[in-house]
Image (cartoon, helix red, strand yellow):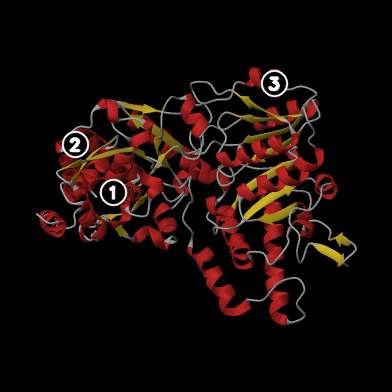
Amino acid sequence: MEKIIQNIDIKAIRKDFPILSQQVNGKPLIYFDNAATNQKPSSVIHALTSYYSHDNANIHRGNHTLADRATAAFEDTRKAVQQFIEAKEAEEIIFTSGTTESINLVASTYGRANIKEGDEIIISGMEHHSNIVPWQLLCEEKGAVLKVIPVNELGEIEFSKFEQLLSEKTKIVSIVFASNSLGTINPIRKIIDKSHQFGAIVLVDGAQAAAHLEIDVVELDCDFFALSAHKMYGPTGVGVLYGKRELLESIPPYKGGGEMIKEVTFENTTYNDIPYKFEAGTPNIADVIAFKNAIEFINKIGKETIAEHEIELLAYATEKIKKIDRVKIIGEAKEKVSVLSFIVDDIHHFDIGQMMDARGIAVRTGHHCTQPLMHQFNIEGTVRASFSVYNTKEEIDELIISLEKIIKIL
Amino acid sequence: MSINEIQDQIINDFSLLDGDMEMSNIYLMELGQKLTDLPEKDKIEDNVVKGCQSKVWLTAELNNDNVVFYADSNTAITKGLVSLLVRVYSNQSPQDILNSELYFIEKIGMSRFIGTQRSNGFGAMIKQMKLYAIALQAKTE
């Protein structure tokens, strides 16, 4: 594996990201906020301008050349996503605005149609607000109960506690693959198998995992899988909901409008087939099309190679940061994606973020939309550095030097 | 000194830093340290100006028909920003505060803190100071 890593030409990769060559506050930009959104390669940026320069048209119903081109490109991305997550059919891929909408879609369609009073939905203690609130809304509406798998001090879910929570009442388990604030990779396969034994369906929030981990939805046997393009080198405003065909066919539509219908009369409307049943209105055509270039970017380097590089960066940064006095890492799970969350004794994360920014280093500070998790660790928030394929050890050295200086100053 | 004279003084002080963000942050933290501490009894939820990442506490009282502000923050840089607002608006009449236009924030390169209530509550604090001025103005009449 070492050999593959050496084969990555980070310098060449960095050249492909125009945004990285700028200075911020007089210093070369070091972008470590990749868990929030990562940067876009030239091919993605070019695809956006090229679409609007040459192919812009509304898709699917046009009867002219541009509409045909736009439709073909849009559907090509669906096929690329299908292959990327190893789904059986392209029809199982629904485009949404992002992971948040994907989860809301399942809660409002599958959830509304299937959840009854007294039913139980299980999430974990490390969920993003977008995988908490939609279920709270559903539980409130239906009189169902939300159960939470506890997280231990390392930031790992307590699997035995999860097993205790499962029962015949469990209808949905919705769980994050990789935590955005801690980096923890959850044992998704085991969770899915166990949930299925009790007849519950499983939604996997793959937002943070999609660019870093191998995903095979058939092998995982998950019922739904949600991801966001912008966390995988793609444009903002595009997400995916994968669902098993029989589930998608059995649940009611999400939004009403154009595209999602077969026939409309004032008395009755029949719905289109999947995936169109869930794609009402003109979709985010340009960004969906450019998303394919992002997938190609990942495929070209190879997800395994990207992951190896990122994990090496994480290990390097973790080792160095541990040597700094007063620094405590939050989230020390055995299996992690490249997210390094930490706090410094007596220094507020907001001040660290501001001081890092003054030195050209972009990190995220705050609760990372996981307030319940922060409460558990008894903290208001953390400083989070997260790494992508274009980051380097030299940049991490700069982060460490800066952190040491900032701690001295503050 | 008038509100605008104080604003001009602050702009002048910051001009020596030549837009260096790190030096500006350090200077802000020094200013924050000099701010009179808010008594612990006043650090209560009712006095909090909400921000997403840092907390600001703000109280005010009348002194010879002028408003005196007391403030604090749990983050060092925000406390520095808060101290600047206290410096500009304390010991001014409610009417002068309400008529004022804050231009120093942009001139010292800190406009990123305004309108980002989510991150530090600074924008919300300015609004709260003016609300105090309205409330205290009623008492002077």
Amino acid carrying mark 1 in the image: Ala
Disc 2 and disc 3 in contact, CB within 8 angstroms: no
Asked if residue B40 can be seen in this view, the reply is: yes
Which residue does the numbered mark 1 point to in the structure image?
Answer: B138
Q: Earlier in the sequence, mark 2 or mark 3?
A: 3
- Give the number of the mark in front: 2 or 3: 3
Circle nearer the viewer, 3 or 1 = 1
Pick the front one: B92 or A121: B92
Work out how far the residue at label 3 is from the one at label 1, CA to CA, in angstroms: 58 Å
Of tags 1 and 2, the one toward the viewer is: 1
Q: Is residue A120 left or right of residue B62?
A: right
Quarter of the image where one finds residue A355: top left
Q: What is the chain letter for disc 3? A: A
2 and 3 marks on the same chain: yes
| Residue A359 appears anywhere in the view | no
- Tell me: residue A62, above or below residue B34: below
Q: Disc 3 marks which amino acid?
A: Leu
Kindly identify which chain the residue marked by label 2 belongs to: A
Query: In the picture provided, is A338 more to the left or to the right than A127?
Result: left
Q: Which residue is mark 2?
A: A409
**Mark 1 neighbour density, 10 Å: few (under 14) some (14–19) many (20 or more):** few
